[in-house]
Image (spheres, rainbow, N blue to C red):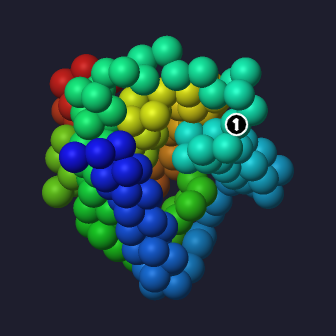
Amino acid sequence: MSTTNIVHIVHYSWGGLVLIWLASAARTKPSLRTTGVWSRLMSVTTMLFGFILVISGSFPNWLAAEPLAPYAGLRWSGATLTLLGCSFAVWARMALGANWSGRPTVKSGHQLIVGGPYAFARHPIYTGLLVAAIGTTFADLQWPRVLGVAIIAGVMLFKIRQEESLMMDTFPDTYPRYRQNVKALIPGLF
């Protein structure tokens, strides 16, 4: 199989994720509490910039050096990670259902979801997106993609702190126990 197939796997994985996100975005509950507009604007803008760096393939030649380009195994591993990461994020998005929001939010009638992918990570959407971003970087290793992954990870850690605070306030009896038993991003580690 050719490099073109790797590119197709990566693009179709991200494209499928975006289509599912857009199709399901309208079916969410009204928000009761959320983060401020400034915080939202900064995190969305920064995260979007990180994803543009990861997904874009248009870099000046001096930025687009591919130090591991000859390693087809790394590229295929990257495409596989992209597909698995996007799939995991979609699974988590579907499990969250109407409780989902693109920003740290408490919804009307918010439920604490602890099954499905939430049994493995408290923030499985972020886990999936981060795995997919790392996979995309491996599939076509260029330095701006590495920077993009670092930016995405930084924004996710910032948003996790906000979400954790909201969940602790909303579910003071059950969330601390869930938090103690399930790691934030990487099952069994972090």
Q: Residue at x 27, y 57 (%)?
A: 87
Q: Is residue 124 above or below residue 108?
A: above
**Residue 50 percent across, percent down from the top left:** 64, 39
Q: Depth check: 141 or 183 in front?
A: 141
Q: Depth check: 15 or 74 in front?
A: 74
Q: Residue at x 38, y 63 (%)?
A: 12
Please, which residue is most extreme toward the top here?
67
How many marks can you see? 1
Q: Is residue 110 above or below residue 54?
A: below
Left or right: residue 74 versus residue 169 is: left
**Residue 83 percent across, percent down from the top left:** 29, 51
Secondary structure, mark 1, is loop
Q: Residue at x 62, y 63 (%)?
A: 33
Residue type at numbered disc 1? Phe
- Where's the C terminus, which quadrant? top left
Give the quarter of the image for residue 186: top left
Left or right: residue 121 versus residue 125 is: left
Q: Which residue is mark 1?
A: 59
Q: How packed is label 1: few (under 14 Cα within 10 Å), some, or many (20 or more)?
A: some
Q: Residue at x 17, y 57 (%)?
A: 116
Residue 30 shows up from this direction? yes
Give the quarter of the image for residue 76: top left
**Residue 91 percent across, percent down from the top left:** 26, 61
Please, which residue is most extreme toward the front here?
2
Residue 96 shows up from this direction? no
Left or right: residue 27 versus residue 146 is: left
**Residue 53 percent across, percent down from the top left:** 64, 39
